[in-house]
Image (cartoon, grey):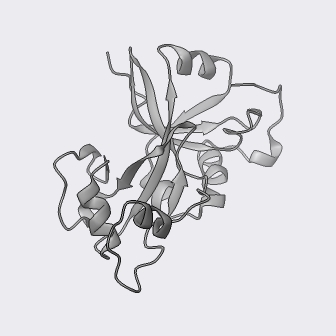
Amino acid sequence: MSSTLAPGILVASPTLRCPFFHHTVVLLVDDDDEGSFGFVVNKQSPIDFDDVAEELELKMPTGTEGIVPVLHGGPVSPDTGWIVFDPRGAKRLPDDVILLSDELAISASLSMLQDIASGRAPSRAMLSLGYSGWSPGQLEEEMSDGSWIPIDLDTEILFELPLASRWDRAVRSLGFDPGMLTGFVAQA
């Protein structure tokens, strides 16, 4: 049974003090009886796309360095990569693309990574290294504890805002000034 949370956005509660998830914004891709899956979309990876391209031996012409941001998508499988992108801006879609909405898709396609390295990146895209996952019932429990706040999918938050502004904007979309929120300290 799928939930109405995905695709959507999870905002870490201001009181969530877990070192990895403090002040994070998560694109929730899937949420069902088997668990939940998503990507942190506001945490810069310590490596950039040039490093990824070099590791995968992708051909990069001069001038395409840093073409897409590389994010630390979560603590699970940080050696895996997922391209989060707006499919309307893609030159071609790989066979393994998962369409989440008209404006949002994900793929783990090596051919798409090569397209990006060659300067043919979708106009709105990011590479997520690793992912965030929850076992069955875990996310619901963390939400009932006040650790996560769901909001509607907003691709402007995902693609248009600087990383440092995404959490604040997501919280403000709920009608809260993050500086005015206080409460208990939640642990995830």
Judge from the rendering whether residue 181 lies leftward or rightward of residue 176; answer left or right: right
- Where residue 119 sits, quadrant-wise, is bottom left
Q: Which residue does the image show at 34% across and 82% down from the upper left?
A: 61
Choose between 81 and 106: the one closer to the eye.
81
**Quarter of the image that includes the N terminus:** top left
- Residue 92: image location, x then y, percent: 17, 63
Residue farthest toward the bottom in the current orientation of the protein:
62
- Residue 74: image location, x then y, percent: 55, 40
Q: Does residue 35 show up?
A: yes
**Quarter of the image that includes the C terminus:** top right
Tally of marks: 0
- Where residue 150 sits, quadrant-wise, is top right
Query: As displayed, is residue 136 above or below residue 9?
Result: above
Judge from the rendering whether residue 15 lies leftward or rightward of residue 188; answer left or right: right
- Where residue 18 sits, quadrant-wise, is top right
Q: Does residue 122 show up?
A: no
Q: Which residue does the image show at 79% across and 39% down from the upper left?
A: 181
Choose between 79 and 158: the one closer to the eye.
79
- Residue 37: image location, x then y, percent: 44, 31
Query: As displayed, is residue 171 above or below residue 57?
Result: above
Q: Which residue does the image show at 60% across and 54% down from the upper left?
A: 166
Judge from the rendering whether residue 122 lies leftward or rightward of residue 80; answer left or right: left
Query: As displayed, is residue 78 above or below residue 125?
Result: above
Q: Which residue does the image show at 28% across and 73% down from the upper left?
A: 120
Choose between 163 and 118: the one closer to the eye.
118
Judge from the rendering whether residue 4 lies leftward or rightward of residue 139; answer left or right: left
